[in-house]
């Protein structure tokens, strides 16, 4: 009826208590992030992104990914 897959409903059911206790402004339960592996590359990509945006250039997710891979190599 709502287009939600069964797996998502199961996850919500399993986490019902946590979800009900969460602040209404939060969008997800804590623990779904990964630590930054290469802080120097992350900082360089952020600098690159900021320069592009200040110049009025549109930055896409793909271009960010390409720049990060270029810097990694």
Image (tube, grey):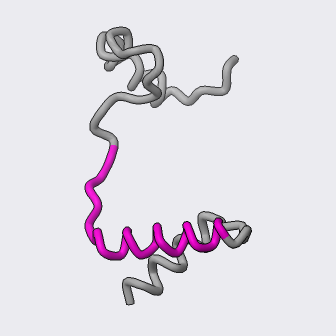
Question: What residue lies at 39% left-to-right and 15% top-to-bottom?
Answer: 23
Question: What residue lies at 39% left-to-right and 25% top-to-bottom?
Answer: 11
Residue 19 picture quarter: top left
Single out the residue that lies furthest toward the bottom: 73
Question: What residue lies at 47% left-to-right and 86% top-to-bottom?
Answer: 70
Is 36 one of the magenta-colored residues? yes
Is 9 one of the magenta-colored residues? no
Q: Main secondary structure of the magenta part?
A: helix
In which quadrant of the rendered image does the C terminus lie? bottom left
Horizontally, residue 23 falls left or right of residue 40, namely right
Question: What residue lies at 30% left-to-right and 10% top-to-bottom?
Answer: 17
Q: Residue 6 in the image: x percent, y percent? A: 51, 26
Residue 60 picture quarter: bottom right
Horizontally, residue 54 falls left or right of residue 22, namely right
What number of labels is visible?
0
Span colored in magenta:
33-54
Q: Nearer the viewer, residue 53 or 41?
A: 53
Residue 5 picture quarter: top right
Horizontally, residue 11 falls left or right of residue 70, namely left
In which quadrant of the rendered image does the N terminus lie? top right
Horizontally, residue 49 falls left or right of residue 42, namely right
Q: Residue 10 in the image: x percent, y percent? A: 41, 22
Q: Residue 22 in the image: x percent, y percent? A: 35, 16
């Amino acid at each position: 009826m709502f287009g939600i897959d069964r797996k998502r409903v199961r996850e919500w059911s399993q986490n019902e208590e946590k979800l009900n206790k969460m602040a209404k402004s939060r969008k997800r339960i804590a623990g779904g992030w990964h630590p930054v592996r290469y802080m120097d590359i992350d900082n360089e990509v952020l600098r690159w992104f900021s320069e592009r945006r200040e110049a009025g250039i549109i930055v896409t997710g793909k271009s960010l990914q390409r720049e990060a891979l270029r810097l990694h190599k």
